[in-house]
Image (cartoon, rainbow, N blue to C red):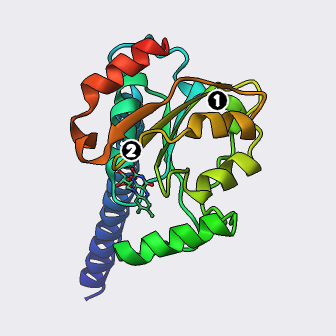
Amino acid sequence: MNKKLIVLIGAIIIIAIVGILIFVFVGNNNENDNETNNNMNHENINSANNNDNSDNTEESNILVLYFSMSGNTEAVANIIHNEVGGNIIKLETKEEYPKDYDELLDYAQEEQRDHARPELATTIDNIDNYDIIFLGYPIWWTDMPMPIYTFLDEYDLSGKTIAPFITHGGSGLSGTPATIREEEPNATVTEGLAIYGSRAQNSRDQIIDWLNNIEM
Ligand SMILES: Cc1cc2nc3c(=O)[nH]c(=O)nc-3n(C[C@H](O)[C@H](O)[C@H](O)COP(=O)(O)O)c2cc1C
């Protein structure tokens, strides 16, 4: 009886030790897997930021910053980003704009009349790191949407190059590069790019011509 008890206790101890060893081993392997995944994600992000036509040494100096409600300007921003690399950020406001088009028209017009500066939800922590800012927006009432004014008010872009790109329904640039020059007198503002909203998805050739023109 005693012997049986000793054998039973011995078996329990051995099972417990084996269990602990399996737990420790599998746990470590999972951690390694997570680390590998993290590294892979990092690599993916890096390669997503890579572009085909540059040496990439200056890619962190480039920011593609855009505001877009219905996605046209976003489509152009993505094409530009693919071509020039760097970082891409969508400018968002704390208060959402109306989803209904007619309401949006009225809302935006009122903001413009009031010279509103809608609060931004987006913050750009490291603006000093960027030398070149591609700044994109839709034309609203033949002007820039007011959140772009908020951005230009909040950030000092002295010494930087700003390359404006817009989408529109017929008004073109509407003189907005000149307005940016007034708002940021110590920045260099390049010739702007105007794309019809309906052509945004198919604007790569026009974008490449513009990038060549402005030597980017
Ligand atoms: C509030 C508002 C005002 C607009 N005003 C103009 C305008 O004055 N001239 C113009 O050509 N297009 C105007 N549009 C059309 C937009 O510029 C065009 O649809 C643009 O591609 C939308 O870009 P998004 O999809 O990035 O928001 C206006 C659109 C909205 C919503």
User: What residue would you read off at disc 1?
Assistant: 130
What amino acid is labelled 1 in the image? Tyr
Q: Is mark 2 within 8 Å of ligand 1?
A: yes
The residue nearer to you, when weighing 14 against 182, is: 182
**Would you place residue 189 above or below residue 31 in this image?**
above
Q: Is residue 45 left or right of residue 119?
A: left
Q: For the residues carrying marks 1 and 2, which lies nearer the camera in this image? A: 2
**Would you place residue 175 above or below residue 24 in this image?**
above
Ligand 1 positioned in quadrant: bottom left
User: What residue would you read off at disc 2?
Assistant: 167
Q: What is the x, y in percent for residue 130?
A: 64, 29
The residue nearer to you, when weighing 177 against 67, is: 177
Q: Secondary structure at mark 1?
A: loop
What amino acid is labelled 2 in the image? Thr
Marks 1 and 2, how far apart at CA: 24 Å
Residue 16 position by quadrant: bottom left
Residue 2 position by quadrant: bottom left
The residue nearer to you, when weighing 27 against 129, is: 129
Q: Is residue 102 left or right of residue 136?
A: left
